[in-house]
Amino acid sequence: MAHLRKITVAGLFGLYDHDLDLRQDPPLTIVAGPNGVGKTTLLRLTTALLRGTYRELPRYEFGTLTVENEFGATIEAERTADLEPSDGAVSFVLRLRHGTGRPQETMIEVHPSVSDLMVMPDFLERYDSETFVDVRDGELIAEDEVLMRWGGRGRELMPPPTPPDWFKADDWRVDFIETKRLDTLISSSQVARRSIQWRGSGLVNVERRGSPINRYLRVVAQALEKARLESALINQSRTSTVARRLLGEYSSKSVNVERLRERYAQVERHAAALTANRLLSDSLAALPGGKLNPTQKRFFEMFLDDFEAKLEPLDPISQKLEQLRSIIGHKFLNKELAISPEHGLTFIVEPAGNEIVADSLSSGEQHELALISRLLFDERPGTTVLIDEPELSLHVSWQHEMVEDLLEIARVSDLSFVLATHSTAIINNRWDIVDELGPLDLNAEDRGQDKTSVAN
């Protein structure tokens, strides 16, 4: 796994050559520039190349797209100059280079996707390169299912090209969050839809109501459950070998009682923090007062070793929960994050102390919760996350805090970020991490005016 370090495109829209040097310290780059220079398009093309979703590539005019990772490897897509086949397919050459060695090359032929072959219903919007969203209720629909539902008989979809054998996805971890799509899902969560479905022996009219925020919170719940399971397996394994270890490796161990009591107090505080996050249900057994004999000291030393091993898989999730609590705690007015066994993440509304579930939050709060939850709990370490227009639905004061929030998430989760934005509130005078895409205003009186014109 490796973070991205450089993105270069030549001939974008037949007009622009862009060269982005992505920051390492801090691991966040802001891409600014006027409408039409290709900020969002560059992120989409990068995602398509690195995820092997090549049907996205022909939608935009460009000559070559090159991405470099932190190990110095580069991968490139070059559109061929050959005439396009009559069925609308487009050819690309994919190249992988390591250092100055000879590149590995593969030619691919990309055929049109569903949305290029048919008139789409007005209520369908593309969510990503392989999925659509029904804006009436937030339902995500795979491309093949769109073709089956609305494509008509006799239409066939050519299979997409697959990545070459030499492409290793873990060396190019990337995710693209198009905030407009996230906003569509959240804003559609309260829209009811009636649909015809098969029930039993006939068709019935069914009302459906989406709750997209819960899709994101399920990821949090799954992460909690996975950590608890790992902890339980460690505990089970160690419990089954207590007698053997006590009579074996611990039988001759010398234990200082003062150090033991200090360590016990530290583990007790550690366990209390995990219990507060509903990650731990059993408490630390009391350490007897008074004098301990050598056997007792060895037993409690082994007990603390085992208890700490059980806590280890819970620590990363607990740290992320604390980060989530910190980020939203000072943004959501009169609401405190809680963890409920029945409902997962909930909120206590002050001063009455009422508990509400996530889909009772405002759309702006749901948007922030969905974004931060996804970044903390659904991204793999080593991923470069590309975010388009993160300012949507966010209050200006929240935009001011975004860079610092993302840097904390990067630290906790080993992520790096690239933001495409028009918001000077998000930049918040951090011009040291801004890459400006032209054309620039050459008549600006000074650098400050030039930056302002680019960002707006």
Image (spheres, helix red, strand yellow):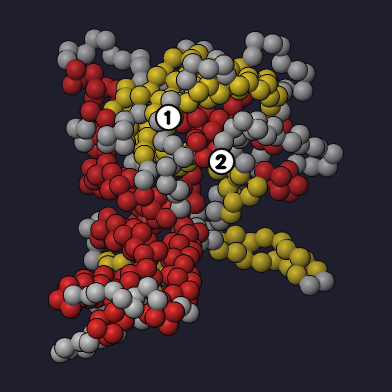
Q: Nearer the viewer, residue 99 or 124?
A: 99
Q: Name the residue at 66% across, 23% down.
A: 106
Mark 1 to mark 2: distance in Å? 28 Å
In the figure, residue 450 lies in which quadrant?
top left
Q: Is residue 370 visible?
A: no
Element marked by disc 1: loop
Q: Name the residue at 31% across, 30% down.
A: 23
Q: Is residue 166 visible?
A: yes
Q: Position of residue 176 (x, y in %)?
A: 47, 39
- Which of the two discs, 1 and 2, labels the residue nearer the N terminus? 1
Q: Position of residue 124 (x, y in %)?
A: 61, 44
- The answer to whether 381 appears left or right of 159 in the picture is left
Q: Position of residue 243 (x, y in %)?
A: 42, 83
Element marked by disc 2: strand
- Where 423 sits versus 101, above or below? below
* Label 2 sits on residue: 128
Q: Which mark is residue 71?
A: 1
What amino acid type should be assigned to the residue bearing mark 2? Asp
Of badges 1 and 2, the one in the foreground is 1
Q: Name the residue at 31% across, 24% down.
A: 435
The C terminus lies in which quarter of the figure?
A: top left
